[in-house]
Amino acid sequence: MISNPSSSGTNTCTLQLRGLTVPGFAQTPYQLQPNGFVIAPTPATQSLKVGYATLQCTANVEAQLLYSYYSSNGTKLAEAAVFSSPPSTKVQILADTREGAQIGIGIANDSDVQNTYIISVDDGSGTVAGTVKGTLGPRTSIARYLSELMTLPPNYVGRVTVSPTTGTGTSSIIGLRYSGTVFATIPETIQP
């Protein structure tokens, strides 16, 4: 979903899928009239795809992706919006694993160079629950549950920070809290 908040001027946007393709989904430029919008659904007939998307526009827009989870009979079970995650050298999400929730994290490297980064999990008071180092190639992404990356204390609540091992790398992240059939997105926060 893309919205042009300007009341004076057409805005042209191009959506680029990275690491995945979606049959029947047009990636042509979108022309947004003043105060206009576009909602471009996918056919939702393929198996799970993993990757990330970028949106390049001629002026500022409001944009988000809406993910819906359906049962095999077509009943909608859950839905969550994913907002823009601008790249930065240090980004974080907040994690809450109480009530048996799983926390997932997606990391994208939308640059032309390999990015080596550290994922650090702490309680906000300086107590580190775990760290892990990873590498992402140019224009690639990874998505994992935190429990696949490290062992967290039960009912962990804290922050998950992603930062490069050198001062020049950047990443974009998004979090997902999954509890049963209910899921919610956790937006990134850019850190100084």
Image (cartoon, grey):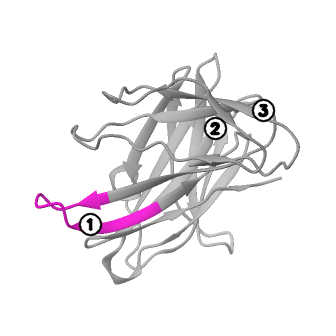
Which residue is the site of mark 2? 171
Q: Position of residue 43 (x, y in %)?
A: 30, 40
- In this rendering, would 76 be left or right of 67? left
Q: Are marks 3 and 1 in contact (CB under 8 Å)?
A: no
Q: Residue extending furthest top?
A: 112
Mark 2 Cα shell of 10 Å, populated few (<14), some (14-19), many (≥20): many
Mark 1 Cα shell of 10 Å, populated few (<14), some (14-19), many (≥20): few
Q: Nearer the viewer, mark 3 or mark 2?
A: 2
Q: Residue extending furthest right?
A: 8
Q: Nearer the viewer, mark 3 or mark 1?
A: 1
For the residue marked with disc 1, what is the amino acid?
Answer: Lys
Q: Nearer the viewer, mark 1 or mark 2?
A: 1
Q: Is residue 61 magenta?
A: no
Q: Position of residue 63 (x, y in %)?
A: 64, 49
Which residue is the site of mark 1? 76
Q: Which disc, if any, is residue 148? A: none
Please give the name of the residue rendered at 29% of the width and 59% of the height, measured from the top-left corner.
69
For the residue marked with disc 2, what is the amino acid?
Answer: Ser
Q: Position of residue 169 (x, y in %)?
A: 70, 30
Q: Tell me the magenta residue range.
A: 69-80
Q: Is residue 72 magenta?
A: yes
- Marks 1/2: CA–CA distance: 32 Å
Compared to 153, does 6 lie above or below? above
Which residue is the site of mark 3? 167
Q: Secondary structure at mark 3?
A: loop
For the residue marked with disc 3, what is the amino acid?
Answer: Gly
Q: Nearer the viewer, residue 172 or 78?
A: 78
Please give the name of the residue rendered at 78% of the width and 32% of the height, measured from the top-left corner.
167
